[in-house]
Each structure stands twice: as C-alpha cells, then as structure tokens.
Amino acid sequence: MDNGDGPKKWGFQGNAELNASSISVRGVLNRVYANLDKDDKRPTIPLGRADPTEFPSYQTTRLAPDAVANAAFSYNFNCYAPTGGIAETRRAVAEYLSKDFPYQLSPDDVYLAAGCTQAIEIVVSVLARPNANILLPRPGYPQYEARASVSNLEARHFDLIPEKGWEVDLDSIEALADENTVAMVIINPSNPCGNVFTSQHLKKIAETARKLGIFVISDEVYSHLAFGSNPFVPMGVFGSIVPVLTLGSISKRWIVPGWRLGWIVTCDPNGIFQQSGLSRIGFN
Ligand SMILES: *Cc1c(COP(=O)(O)O)cnc(C)c1O
C-alpha cells in the first residue's frame, strides 16, 4: 500500500498523566503480575484481587439479576436518565442508607454515578478550584491521587497509625490543613488496611474537620463488610457535626462490580452544602 503523502509526523499523543498503569489499581496489579517469574511454578495467593466474582462461592442473590431483567424487559428504562439518576433509584438509596442514620435522607441527597469510581471522579473535579487542596489517607486508595492529579487538585497526605488500629492521625490533619483545604477523605471500612473505625473515632474526625471548616468525604464502598470486632458505623451519623459526602456502590456488598452503580450522598441535616453553593455546582 502506498502511504506516500501522509504527514511527516502525526500531531497527536495521549495525556501521559492518564497512563493506566499509574492511575488505576488494576494497572498496578497488572504491573505486579507482569513481573512474576514465569518459570517459578509455585502457586500465587491473589492478595491484590478486588473482584470476588472470580470465586464461585461469592454470588449475588438471585433477586438481583431478576430485578435487572424485569427492568430491562419492561422497556421503561431505555431512556436517558436525569443527570442525578432515576428518582426511584435515588429514593431507594436514600431509604437504604437512612436505616443507619438518626435523621432521614431525601432522594435529593442522592446523586447516582457509574460506580464509586465515577463518584470519586465527580467529587474530585467539582472540588478542584484553583489552589484548592484535599487531605487523603496514607495508605489509601490510589484513585483519589489519580483523579486529583488529572484535575490539578493538590493532594496532601495524613497518616493512618498502625499501632492504633489504623486510626487517623488527627494532629497531622490540623497541621496539614490551611485556608485552601476543602475536604478530607476517609475510607471506612478501610481499603487497603481492612480496619473499621469506631464510632468514637469517627466523632473525633467529625469534630476535627468542623474545627478546620472542611467537610468529610467518606468512602463506604465496603460498608457492612466489616472484619474484626468494631461494627460498621456510617460517617453520615455525624452529619450534624460536619457535612459529610458519602460515597458508595453496589459493587462490593452485592458482589456485582460489573454493574457500575454507585452514589454520592449529601449527609448534611444542617444544609451547609446548600449554603456553600456546592449543591449548585454539581450535587442536585
Ligand atoms: C472498589 C473501590 C472503589 C470503586 O468501586 P466501584 O463501585 O467498583 O467503582 C472505590 N473506593 C474503594 C476504597 C474501593 O475499594
């Protein structure tokens, strides 16, 4: 084939910051697997595997695919959904989360996303105004760093203290925050540490954030999948001390990571988000 009169050099290239192996958990995992010694026949233990569907003992309830099939066959949901999600689904999420809360969430508090991954993308891009910074846990979940980097939102890290069951180093939060800090992220139950924060510790986090005038983003994608003796308590329980954005999804608890349904929920009975204008620029 004669390709004679093409350009000397193609004028496009990808954004290197989006290089999959540096921004996604799966990318890191693939890199680890690529470095395994192929001649070493010992079995490997998949400590980094987040997809439980590969194990036959983990199956979601039959009710779930039945409900999805019924919805598809009804032909009622082939439309473009409203930006925040279909009202019925938002109501269902609000009612589900409210069971653990001392107040009632409204469907308007719920904003649906394509999994918790997109929820993180949305929240980080909404917060990325010039000079803003966000406080992230270390160790944490690399999706937050990746999205912050792509959105030019400065990430500052606070430590989780192994000797204290991976509790947040609250003193370092106070040292890191300044007038441009918008929020701090917690992941509870923790990925990667596996611990569950006590109610007392969550309350201290709420009080620290309140003192600093920042809000809390609580990634609860593993909610109710709690190991150890601490029962899972949602951060939204302390929403009257500090406004909380709760992120979650059906991926982990219902063992359907391929279905891509997640949520961002404003847990803010005092309406602080409304006053701050955050709800106008994305949420609701
Ligand atoms: C798995 C995971 C996510 C992403 O969940 P999806 O709903 O599958 O997109 C977000 N945060 C943490 C901490 C996770 O472990």
Image (cartoon, helix red, strand yellow):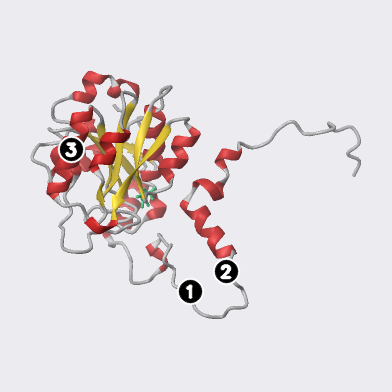
> How crowded is the residue under tag 1: few (<14 C-alpha within 10 Å), some, or many (20+)?
few
Kindly tell me whether mark 1's CB lies below 8 Å from ligand 1: no
Element type where label 1 sits in the image: loop
Mark closest to the chain's N terminus, 3 or 2: 2
Q: Amino acid at mark 3?
A: Ala
Q: Amino acid at mark 2?
A: Leu
Whole-number angstrom distance, CA of label 3 to CA of label 1: 41 Å
Whole-number angstrom distance, CA of label 3 to CA of label 2: 43 Å
Q: Quadrant of the N terminus?
A: top right
Between 234 and 162, which is closer to the camera in this rendering? Answer: 162
Mark closest to the chain's N terminus, 1 or 2: 2
Whole-number angstrom distance, CA of label 1 to CA of label 2: 9 Å
Between 74 and 81, which is closer to the camera in this rendering? Answer: 81
The disc at residue 44 is 1
Element type where label 3 sits in the image: helix
Is residue 210 shown left or right of residue 112?
left
Element type where label 2 sits in the image: loop
The outermost residue toward the bottom is 41
Between 181 and 31, which is closer to the camera in this rendering? Answer: 181
Please tell me whether residue 111 is drawn above or below residue 27 in the rendered image: above
Q: Quadrant of the C terminus?
A: top left
Q: Position of residue 56 (x, y in %)?
A: 37, 71
Q: Position of residue 266 (x, y in %)?
A: 23, 33
Please tell me whether residue 17 is drawn above or below residue 59 in the rendered image: above
Residue to which mark 2 is pinned = 36
